[in-house]
Image (spheres, rainbow, N blue to C red):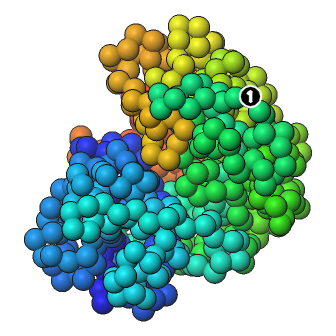
Amino acid sequence: MKALIIDVLGAHEEGRKATLDVIGAGPRSIAGVLRKKGVDVDLIPYERIDQVEIGRYDILLVSAMTSDLPISKKIVEKWNKFNKVSIAGGPIACDPIDPLIKAKFGICVIGEGEETLSELIDSGFNSLDKIRGLAYLEGGEMRINPLRPIMPRKIYDSYEPLTNVVKSYPFYWARRVYVEVVRGCSNFFRTRLKLPNGKKCNNCDNCRSGDLEDRYNCPQGIPPGCGFCSVPSTFGPPRSRSVEKIVKEIEGLLREGCKRIVLSGSDILDYGRDLLVDPKPLTNPREPEPNYDVLEELFIRVTELPDIERGKAFISIENVKACLVTEKAAKLLGKYFRGATVHIGCETGSEEHARLIGRPSSPSEVIRAVKLLRENGLRPYVYFIHGLPGQSYETVEDTVEVMEKVYEAGAEKITVYRFRSLPMSAFSSFKTAPPAVKSELSMRIVCKAKEVNVRSKRALVGKRLKAIVASPYHKDKSLLVAYPIKHGPVVLIKRRNSLIGRLIKVKITNVISDRLVKGRILSSA
């Protein structure tokens, strides 16, 4: 049996315009499941579909987000000519109507896919009604099986993502390769906004002050977490992988030539925190404090790997919740990841709005976290969302004010997303927000972010940094694209073909946009 996995994550309607340098953890995890089952598996990004003969495969698996439906549909149209098994996974599968009815997939895997996919292969793709976590069509009607319980930590840790498949991605050596260290999210707060489907918090406060196990269930049936996010309802509370498995995976990626590894999770500071409350689920985003000993054990092991110690590759971290950024946590992160970026969600600058949408941290805590992280040598990036349910003139003014404050506190970049209605999130019954250009309030947020980011980029002029050369620049073939080894803005340099794949030192000479800077090559690193 031969399977083809296509990574469509972030493609949206017209192909990736951002996060071009990302290789996610999910598709590699699924490739590991298939290999473990003895299936011959290939993994490619969607950009390379025309370079493979898809008809020679027996199974097609597509990993995509809800916004990736248009490109996913085009892929399945090509595949269905062969009348073979097609499977949709990832966030797109949370609402089976999209992949099954609109895109014409045969099967959806909802939620964690490892055990579901294993059983599906063992069944020979028969007896679908007996496998939890599946949705499929039967006689023209959609069938949705009961969801699978969240995997216990030991079973989750038994699965190993493949590492050699990264070579199928263009300029994989320059991309940020995500290694999942903790799955799930500890924020089991609920939104207090009234939802279009009629559900509304009755202020029982169970999700904020109840026992850890009791926080699982809401009397009103409101999904857990920030209203716009589906991670807690899809993947449950955090479960940490063992240090040994994480190190083994990173070693494999380094052997393949990867240079930029990201320790991935909804919150790196949740890593090991689940062990502090075991056997109960970690459903409190604020207490206990981070598990400093376990975090340091992980950080020591990954930063002592030879390629990392010699500066031939770099390990960074992804997200943190502001409420867990204590002085001790900030010092620990700074000790091992000085110079790295770290992402913090703020989403709204309004204290009241943050509470109403179910945020675990307040905007004032975000400002404090940015300051602490910056003081300890990290480079904070802060997320905001425009078009959120509950957005008003007042919340937008508060947001613009907080954007300025996080910049003053040391944030290097502000990232703004448009609110999208996600299946299995509390806000799934709200409509996706219109583009910012169609909303005066949203445009105010977007324009402020651009203004702050350009200001921040100007401060980079004259700075020197180490970057890895990826590829020719698609808009001007006389230039090359280089990615800072410690993350940062895309750097354009004069073209020299011999430099592709090389580490170089560059000096930033000028700012092109809020996303691009230009650099002059100083030397090979």
**Picture coordinates of residue 494, whole percent (x, y):** 34, 44
Which residue occupies the foreground of this view, 491 or 301?
Answer: 301
Residue 328 picture quarter:
top right
Image position of 165 with respect to 402: above or below:
below
Left or right side of 255 for 305? right
Quarter of the figure with the N terminus: bottom left
**Picture coordinates of residue 283, whole percent (x, y):** 75, 50
Which residue occupies the foreground of this view, 285 or 502?
Answer: 285
Circle 1 — which element? loop
Which residue occupies the foreground of this view, 128 or 519?
Answer: 128
- Identified at 21% across, 68% down, the residue is 139
**Picture coordinates of residue 73, whole percent (x, y):** 21, 55
Q: How many marks?
A: 1
Which residue occupies the foreground of this view, 307 or 269?
Answer: 269
Q: Which amino acid type corresponds to the residue marked 1 in the rendered image?
A: Asn
Image position of 359 with respect to 157: above or below:
above
Residue named by callout 1: 203
- Identified at 45% across, 76% down, the residue is 131
